[in-house]
Amino acid sequence: MNPSEPAIQFRDVSKRYVIHHNRPQSFQELLVSLVRRAPGSVEDFWALRDVSFSIPHGETIGIVGHNGSGKSTILKMVAGLFNPTSGKVSVSGRVSALIELGAGFHPDLSGRENVYLFGSIMGIGGREMGQRFDGIVDFAELAQFIDEPVKHYSSGMYMRLGFATALSVDADILLIDEVLSVGDQHFQDKCLEAIEDRKQRGMTILMVSHELALVQRFCHRALLMDHGRLVADGPAHEIIGKYLEGQGS
């Protein structure tokens, strides 16, 4: 991590997806589509268009906007899951992502085995992960089930293990994407306390949530996305107000 550089910087970033309509479901349909050369079967969808912003180290920033506005695409680019079609994304520091919790877990492996697998993916050795293991299990409250294959876990159990494991990484940047929508109130409160702790310790946090009260609670600054474009950047309460005005129009 270089403190003199922004933690996260987007410079004129665009992301395009190619959407295939009426994709052939059989070999016969494929032949017909090739013969007919049906027009309009392919469409460009721009998830982001010319997005630019900079986040200094130690800030907690929220991203708000309607579904499909580009919020999660931004987080996945910071996490290194997507590359931009154009523009540049710069990230300074180690990233831990609370995005699609447990997405990297193997269903046939136990909770214990998946914790160590996650550690190896993040470059954390087995001995070091072993030192963190009991804390992960305690936080997830899964001691009774940690040696069961995760394919037998409920969605709440899966989420708890994913959150606890991702949070165990000593990261400089924490990405959060609607991860508190699953789980009981007790565990949600634990998660919020853990996020507050990371914020107080100076971690850079980028948060996506439709729960505007959470954005208001944790973030002093927010970004407003609309159809892939960054339309406002400012104090969180002002951006939330603009978003709600747009929702009501």
Image: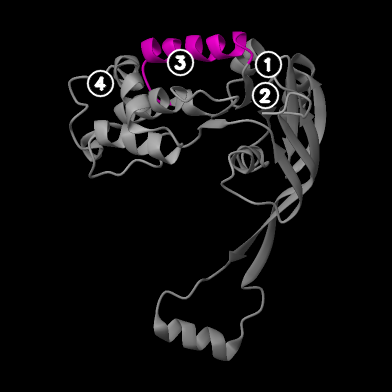
Instruction: Classify residue 117 as left or right of residue 170.
Output: left
The picture quadrant where one finds residue 85 is bottom right
Circle 2: element type: strand
Q: Which residue is mark 2?
A: 62
Is residue 56 one of those drawn in magenta?
Answer: no
In magenta segment, residue 194 = yes
Residue 80 sits above or below residue 194 on the image: below
Q: Earlier in the sequence, mark 1 or mark 4?
A: 4
Q: Amino acid at mark 1?
A: Cys
Question: Identity of the amino acid at label 3?
Answer: Cys
Residue count near mark 4 (Cα–Cα under 10 Å), binned few <14, some 14–19, many ≥20: some
Disc 3 element: helix
Residue 219 marker: 1
In the displayed structure, would residue 131 be above or below residue 86? above
Tag 4 residue: 142
Q: Is residue 233 left or right of residue 133?
A: right
Q: Which residues are magenta?
A: 182-202
